[in-house]
Amino acid sequence: MASGSGSKNDFRRKWDKDEYEQLAQKRLTEEREKKDGKPMPPVKRELLRHRDYKVDLESKLGKTIVITKTTPQAEMGGYYCNVCDCVVKDSINFLDHINGKKHQRNLGMSMRVERSSLDQVKKRFEVNKKKMEEKQKEYDFEERMKELREEEEKAKAYKKEKLKEKKRKAEEDLNFEEDDEMAAVMGFSGFGSSKKSH
């Protein structure tokens, strides 16, 4: 048995009681100051604003990744959020996360939206109207017809290639059948089969 309580086999943790007592006293004094004195000023966050970048959801679509124990968390399966340092397993939950309160708070924004004035709304409508007019000007009938013809030609070429491939396969099958007939004439019935075909 052990020779005493202070031996090498004593694996219990030893706590520094003085240090933890000082920490407790410090916490208590801070709490008293909050109650007695001025309350801590609230953290001022920015108002919520729209994203100026496109969320990339399709880059990893259909790809396989080998994950080992040493693979960094950012390269693990799923969508990695570098702001919150977390991995979300699917795109719907990732969108919920980046639009959620925790992520916005880590970005330094509150969930409150700035109220728009009438002038801002009118300016936004004017900008959108100009964009629509530019798109209508860019639309050219001749160009669209040319694109449609090119698409039809590509479709025809694809069909021709498929037909050629079918013909090649049919010819190979026919050649294979002729080889079987030749083997039967020469006395070979087949490989690995003990049954005779009549």
Image (spheres, rainbow, N blue to C red):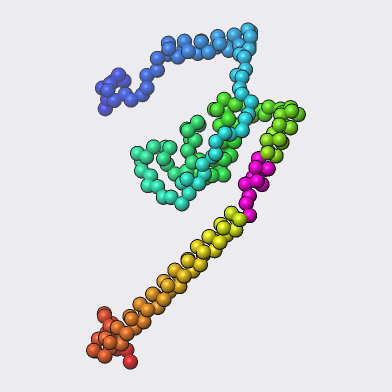
Q: Judge by depth and name the residue closer to the eye, 72 or 26.
A: 72
Locate residue 31: give its quadrant: top right
Q: Is residue 167 visible?
A: yes
Q: Assign the N terminus to one quadrant of the image.
A: top left
Query: Is residue 67 one of those drawn in magenta?
Result: no
Please determine whether, in this image, residue 79 is positioned above or below residue 193.
above
Residue at horizontal 40 percent and vertical 17 percent from the top: 15
Please determine whether, in this image, residue 104 is positioned above or below residue 179.
above
Q: Which residues are magenta?
A: 131-141
Give the number of callouts: 0
Locate residue 75: give its quadrant: top left
Q: Is residue 195 left or right of residue 61?
A: left
Q: Is residue 113 left or right of residue 98?
A: right
Q: Assign the C terminus to one quadrant of the image.
A: bottom left
Residue at horizontal 56 percent and vertical 57 percent from the top: 147
Residue that sits furthest to the front in the current view: 142
Q: Judge by depth and name the residue closer to the eye, 148 or 9.
A: 148
Residue that sits furthest to the right in the current view: 118
Q: Is residue 195 visible?
A: no
Residue at horizontal 58 percent and vertical 30 percent from the top: 104
Picture coordinates of residue 131, whole percent (x, y): 65, 40
Picture coordinates of residue 19, whole percent (x, y): 43, 12
Please determine whether, in this image, residue 79 is positioned above or below residue 106.
below
Q: Main secondary structure of the magenta part?
A: helix
Locate residue 173: give its quadrant: bottom left
Picture coordinates of residue 141, whole percent (x, y): 63, 55
Residue at horizontal 46 percent and vertical 51 percent from the top: 62
Picture coordinates of residue 168, whole percent (x, y): 38, 75
Q: Judge by depth and name the residue closer to the eye, 26 or 76.
A: 76
Please determine whether, in this image, residue 181 is positioned above or below residue 71.
below
Residue that sits furthest to the top in the current view: 37
